[in-house]
Image: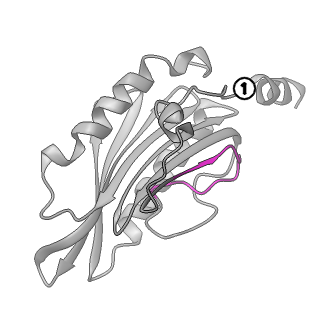
């Protein structure tokens, strides 16, 4: 009990650690764009197919979340979550995979495939459909575990049919964060 408590207390996500924190702190007078920032440990996982508030909550030590929204329908998110142990972060990723499989519906489907990033990662696609054809609207995310950290980058907007190029920015951001996350995570 004491060692786990010490690990939880020593873990922290410092200010300006996330890639987009400086952009989020910049004053923007455009009423159609905004940033929200949260340091709440209990923040919802930004990729949440079932809209389940408890998804990936167990074993969290720290979390930091940034979300950029542009009217009418574009957003991107960055989230870094530290867990008390790598096993808890791994369970969070497995639980997300289960949610992807369980929570598709006829007009909006989710899929996930493993990708070679960090210790393990999922590329998650959410896509609106009309019948069997991809409609306008969806989200693309890369969710990566490195040690006891979960790293999440998402983009949502007026996507058409899912394509490999939809994940370029999220993959680039993930690689940049993977290069520095071990300074705060137990890798």
Neighbor class of circle 1 (other Cα within 10 Å; few <14, some 14-19, many 20+) is some
Against 150, residue 147 (above or below) is: above
In the image, residue 169 lies at what x, y percent?
A: 27, 38
The secondary structure that most of the magenta stretch takes on is: loop
Would residue 82 appear left or right of 133 to someone viewing this image? right
**Mark 1 highlights which residue?**
11
Residue 165, visible in the rendered structure: yes
Would residue 175 appear left or right of 186 to someone viewing this image? left
What residue sits 70% from the left and 43% below the top?
A: 59
- The quadrant of the rendering that contains the C terminus is top right
In the image, residue 57 lies at what x, y percent?
A: 65, 52
- The quadrant of the rendering that contains the N terminus is top right
In the image, residue 10 lies at what x, y percent?
A: 78, 22
Going by the picture, which residue comes out furthest to the front? Answer: 29
What residue sits 29% from the left and 75% below the top?
A: 108
In the image, residue 93 lies at what x, y percent?
A: 48, 46
What residue sits 65% from the left and 31% below the top?
A: 85
Q: Nearer the viewer, residue 35 or 43?
A: 35
Q: Quadrant of residue 62?
A: top right
Asked whether 44 falls inside the magenta stretch, the response is yes
Against 26, residue 10 (above or below) is: above
Counting every numbered tag in the picture gives 1
Q: Quadrant of residue 156?
A: bottom left
Asked whether 121 falls inside the magenta stretch, the response is no
Going by the picture, which residue comes out furthest to the right? Answer: 2
Q: SS for tag 1? A: loop
Against 66, residue 137 (above or below) is: below
Q: Which residues are magenta?
A: 35-47
Residue 115, visible in the rendered structure: no
């Amino acid at each position: 009990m004491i060692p786990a408590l010490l690990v939880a207390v020593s873990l922290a996500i410092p200010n300006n650690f996330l890639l987009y924190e400086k952009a989020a702190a910049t004053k923007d007078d455009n009423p159609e764009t905004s940033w929200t920032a949260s340091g709440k440990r209990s923040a919802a996982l930004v990729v949440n197919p079932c809209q389940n508030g408890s998804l990936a909550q167990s074993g969290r030590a720290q979390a930091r979340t940034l979300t950029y929204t542009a009217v009418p329908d574009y957003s991107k998110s960055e989230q870094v979550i530290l867990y008390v142990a790598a096993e808890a972060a791994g369970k969070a990723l497995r639980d997300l995979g289960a949610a992807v499989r369980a929570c598709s519906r006829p007009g909006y489907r989710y899929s996930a495939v493993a990708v070679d990033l960090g210790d393990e990662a999922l590329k998650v696609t959410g896509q609106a459909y009309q019948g069997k054809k991809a409609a306008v609207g969806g989200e693309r995310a890369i969710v990566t575990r490195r040690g006891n950290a979960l790293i999440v980058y998402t983009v949502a907007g007026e996507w058409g049919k899912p394509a490999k190029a939809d994940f370029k920015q999220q993959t680039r951001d993930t690689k940049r964060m993977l290069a520095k996350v071990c300074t705060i995570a137990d890798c």
